[in-house]
Amino acid sequence: MPDSLNKPKTVAILGAGPVGLAAAAHVLERGMEPVVLEAGPQVGHAVRQWSHVPLFSPWEYAIDAASERLLTAAGWNSPAPDQYPTGGELLAQYLEPLATRTPLKDHIRTSSMVTSVGRAGFDKMKSNGRAFEPFTIRYQNGQASRNGGPEQLKADAVIDATGTWFSPNPAGADGLPAIGEREAQDRIAYGMPDVMGREHARYAGRTVAVLGAGHSAIGTLIDLVRLKAEAPGTEVIWLLRGDKPEKAFGGGANDKLAARGALGTAFAKLVMDGKICVETGFRVSHISRDSEKLRIGAGSSCCGRFVAVDELVVATGFRPDFDFLREVRLSLDPAVECPPILAPLIDPNVHSCGTVRPHGARELAQPEPGFYFAGMKSYGRAPTFLMLTGYEQVRSIVAEIAGDHEAAARVELVLPETGVCSGPGPEANLAKAEASAAGCCGGPAPEPKAAQTPSGCCVADVKAKQEGKKGCGC
């Protein structure tokens, strides 16, 4: 029998974040060979960019089971399950020990930026026999100890867990960079800058606009208000594309991820108290310099609205990078840019309440056999990803790669109910948000007490249906 038939499968894992390292732990546990390629100089390179940010999930939901087994065998002391770590604590207490104190340490290559993935000997057009050939992964090695330069490896399967952090959405409301955005990069930050820590001097005493309506924008706005208490000259402006600020307040006390609910409640109060200047319906079209200020405009450059600021934070979400996958056969939803089966479950245009059911190899498989997306990148442009979801994804994917189809199809995860719609219903107002944070359109729907009582996703939905309407709009 040829030696190649006895050799364990090699699985290339792109990205050494929480989900990538979890994938490697599962691969190792299955008796296969993981090779983890991380673009940054250390594991968790993306997490280091938001190390100051607390997670919405406690440790209970932040640790992968196979990773925990490796760590326990290495004498690791697990953190208290009910405590909420920051990104920095996630690194120091979990990811770094996992990468340096367990057998994974021999399978991780840092400073290794993947530049292309393909099939050995096959371009994208060629089909006959394609599935029987290994993948070729090329990467740029930046480690001085290895002389740097391009390298490549062969793998039987590939799990892309590179995330989306380094591909932020632009400020432009049409999905394109605003006119002048690239020229103003030195005054623009994307994601969640550490305004109370590393970048305190950049924002203290300045007029700062934050564009976006998600949790990254809300967290940054709250921090800027805290900064204003220390540096009274700080002015905070919230640029909102939509017309309803209350939609950003979330589920409040009704959110089973308590930290996330508390964030929305705190933010609602700051807006009500006038601590944040709110510009609704502000769809950024152009950015220019006006003396020492940054002029951010919405509408036409001659007669539209504009605000003048010192700094702009763009927190409009992220998008996946597919450039290095041009030779891989992919199937993606045209809007969300995620695997098509996932799209209706996570598309914010159609999905607003409850949870996304656990999913794995079947939903994440691509037309290219042996290639899978996992983690944040598997969600495309959708913002609702939970770390625990990624752990379940890679457990299932690795089982499928190992040939354990039964385990791959099995669901081994119960997610916490989010209890959040896209925001409070049409009748909600800021006072209601502050007083009770009742959440999704008045709170969860009551259990029907009679056959004629309609069901719904929330209180307002049931009430609307009782009145003969189609529902509340959730």
Image: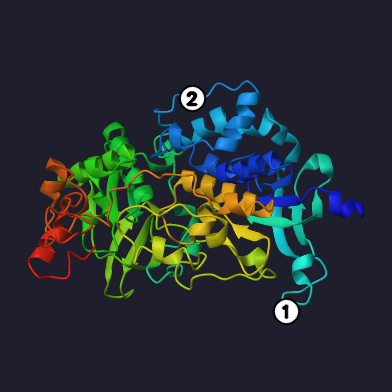
Q: Residue beneath label 2, please?
A: 79
Quadrant in the rendering for residue 241: bottom left
Q: Quadrant of the C terminus?
A: bottom left
At 25% from the left and 65% from the top, the residue drawn is 281
User: In front: 375, or 38?
Assistant: 375
Q: Quadrant of the N terminus?
A: bottom right
| Circle 1 residues within 10 Å: few <14, some 14–19, many ≥20 | few
Look at the numbered disc 2 and give the secondary structure of its residue. Answer: loop
Residue lying at the far left in this picture: please name it.
467
Is residue 108 found left or right of 416 in the rendered image?
right
Q: Residue beneath label 1, please?
A: 125
In the rendered image, the vertical position of residue 148 relative to residue 228, given as above or below: below
Can residue 285 be seen by looking at this rendering? yes
Kind of residue indicated by mark 2: Pro
Q: Which tag, 1 or 2, sits closer to the chain's start?
A: 2
Residue lying at the far front in this picture: please name it.
451
Look at the numbered disc 1 and give the secondary structure of its residue. Answer: loop
